[in-house]
Image (spheres, rainbow, N blue to C red):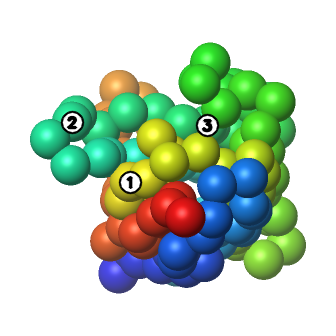
Amino acid sequence: QVQLVESGGGLVQPGGSLRLSCAAYGITFSHYDMGWYRQAPGKQRELVAATTSGGETDYADFVKGRFTILRDNTKDTVYLQMNSLKPEDTAVYYCNAGLVVKGADYAYWGQGTQVSVSS
């Protein structure tokens, strides 16, 4: 059974930092591309950051220079280090694992963790 378990969300003041973690179970983690998405109330889910199985990274423009995605294949875990947080970063953050094999698309989601940025 595949599970992605997020942790690390919470309430933080503007300018503060949080580190989200996503532990993966039931998949060969090193083979998967991993991503962090977020969804704010009334808005669509959007990509925040991603890392490929080869370790390449990509970031949404609105987090470049503030967030860092890091994967640890020895722990089957992907992290999102979030610095200089802004109120507009408030959202539920979701972890995603994706793999395409022989045309078959495998995608899994975590349950989400709430991040609230407010004074």
The residue indicated by pointer 2 is: 43
* Residue at (62, 18) in percent of width and height: 61
Quadrant (top left, top right, bottom left, bottom right) of the C terminus = bottom right
Q: Which residue is mark 1?
A: 91
Q: Is residue 83 above or below residue 20?
A: above
Of helix, strand and loop, which one carries label 2? loop
Along the polypeptide, which appears first: circle 3 or circle 2?
2
Three-letter code for the amino acid on which mark 2 is drawn? Lys
> How many angstroms separate mark 3 from mark 1 (CA)?
14 Å
Is disc 3 placed on a helix, strand or loop?
strand
Instruction: Answer left or right for 57 relative to 98.
Output: right
The answer to whether one can see residue 119 in this image is yes
Give the answer, above or below, for where 63 lies relative to 71.
above
Percent from the top left, x then y, of residue 98? 46, 44
Q: Earlier in the sequence, mark 1 or mark 2?
A: 2
Q: Percent position (x, y) of residue 73?
A: 80, 64
Label 1's element?
strand
Q: Spatial distance from mark 3 to mark 2, Cα to Cα? A: 18 Å
Kindly report the distance in space between the C-alpha atoms of the residues bearing marks 1 and 2. 10 Å
Q: Which residue is mark 3?
A: 49
Does 37 sit above or below residue 93?
above
